[in-house]
Image (tube, rainbow, N blue to C red):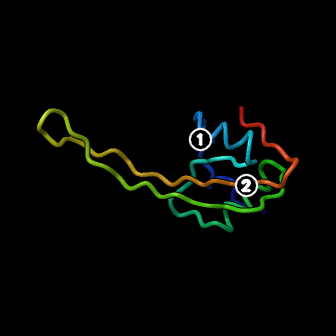
């Protein structure tokens, strides 16, 4: 049984929607500790699809600025771009 709690939520943007329509790629926000094999198992068990490939993108935290002052930090996150087998779809809406 795969740990499906690794996947926080789908990443729904215009670019991610176009990738889903054209290249069978879906983007998910995942936990920072998640590895590619764990993400592959979690998506396969959660959405009942065959996962072909998983790519990950780590976005580091950034400092926020208000005027000339530095206040606060924008959190970093990890995205997983999951390619599924041709002909299969994931309904994320």
User: The N terminus appears in which quarter of the rendering?
Assistant: bottom right
The residue at 77%/61% (across/down) is 52
Front-lying residue, 41 or 51: 51
Question: Mark 2 Cα within 10 Å, few/some/many (few <14, many 20+)?
Answer: many
Left or right, 30 with respect to 60, comes to: right
User: The C terminus appears in which quarter of the rendering?
Assistant: top right
Residue 49 in picture, x, y percent from top left: 83, 52
Task: Name, please, the residue furthest toward the left.
Answer: 68
Task: Name, please, the residue furthest toward the right.
Answer: 87
State the SS at label 1: loop
State the SS at label 2: strand
Left or right, 87 with respect to 78, comes to: right
Task: Name, please, the residue furthest toward the front.
Answer: 22
Question: Mark 1 Cα within 10 Å, few/some/many (few <14, many 20+)?
Answer: some
Residue pointed to by mark 2: 83
The residue at 67%/65% (across/down) is 38
Left or right, 51 with respect to 78, comes to: right
Q: How many circles with numbers are drawn on the protein?
A: 2
Residue 25 in picture, x, y percent from top left: 70, 49
Give the number of the disc on residue 84.
none
Residue pointed to by mark 1: 11
Front-lying residue, 19 or 5: 19
| Quadrant hosting residue 10 | top right
Q: Which mark's residue is nearer the viewer, 1 or 2?
A: 2
């Amino acid at each position: 049984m795969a740990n499906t709690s690794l996947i926080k939520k789908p990443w729904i943007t215009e670019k991610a929607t176009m990738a889903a329509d054209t290249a069978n790629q879906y983007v998910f926000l995942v936990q920072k500790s998640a590895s590619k094999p764990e993400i592959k198992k979690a998506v396969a068990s959660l959405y009942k699809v065959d996962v072909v490939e998983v790519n990950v993108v780590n976005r580091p935290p950034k400092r926020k600025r208000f005027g000339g002052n530095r206040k606060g930090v924008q959190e970093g996150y990890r995205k997983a771009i999951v390619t599924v087998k041709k002909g299969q779809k994931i309904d994320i809406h």
